[in-house]
Image: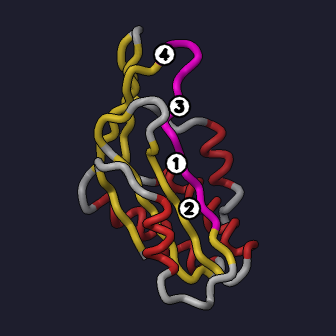
């Protein structure tokens, strides 16, 4: 398990090597990379992410552990960046290892859906018209609901 909250960019190939090194039981690796996207209505100058150190890592670990309980996950990585980011920057990486692709895909999607709504991260977007704190979108809340037991 790799859970990191960091200001520095991440290298997906290095994370993959770290997770798979010495393993012969992995049949599938599913991953998601989120990027900071520009806005149509007001070009994004920057996005700033804040978090509570310790609390955020614990929440990310809890979300990953729940994915491991639901699917046959061999290992996973969740890396989320904080600080000031710009359009095109990598913001989040979720990588899941499993023996089979179905478990890897489902667990990766589950982790990402819960990161969008349950992780204690706060995003402020700044454009030409000022700054706004980003709230969870209805689509994020709807995506999370499909996983409820």
The residue identified by callout 3 is: 37
Q: Earlier in the sequence, mark 2 or mark 1?
A: 2
Q: Are marks 4 and 3 in contact (CB under 8 Å)?
A: no
Q: Which mark is residue 34?
A: none
CA–CA distance between discs 4 and 1? 22 Å
Q: Which residues are magenta?
A: 30-43
Q: Are marks 1 and 3 in contact (CB under 8 Å)?
A: no
Q: Is residue 69 left or right of residue 17?
A: right
What is the crowding at mark 2: few (fewer than 14 residues within 10 Å), some, or many (at least 20)?
many
Nearest the eye: 15 or 55: 15
* Residue depth check, mark 4 versus mark 1: number of the one nearer the observer: 4
The residue identified by callout 1 is: 116
CA–CA distance between discs 2 and 1? 9 Å
Residue 69 locus on image (x, y percent):
58, 80
* Residue depth check, mark 2 versus mark 4: number of the one nearer the observer: 4
Q: Secondary structure at mark 4?
A: loop
Q: Earlier in the sequence, mark 3 or mark 2?
A: 3
The residue identified by callout 2 is: 111
């Amino acid at each position: 398990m790799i859970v990191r909250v960091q200001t520095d960019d991440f290298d997906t190939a290095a994370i993959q090597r770290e997770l798979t090194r010495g393993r012969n039981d992995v049949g599938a690796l599913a991953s998601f990379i989120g990027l900071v996207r520009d806005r149509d209505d007001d070009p994004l100058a920057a996005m700033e992410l804040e978090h509570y150190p310790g609390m955020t890592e614990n929440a990310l670990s809890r979300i990953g552990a729940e994915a491991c309980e639901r699917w046959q996950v061999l290992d996973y990585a969740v890396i989320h960046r904080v600080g000031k980011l710009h359009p095109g920057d990598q913001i989040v990486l979720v990588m899941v290892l499993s023996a089979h692709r179905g478990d890897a895909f489902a667990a990766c999607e589950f982790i990402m859906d819960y990161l969008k709504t349950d992780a204690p991260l706060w995003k402020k977007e700044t454009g030409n018209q000022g700054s706004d704190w980003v709230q969870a979108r209805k689509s994020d809340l709807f995506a999370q609901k499909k996983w409820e037991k």
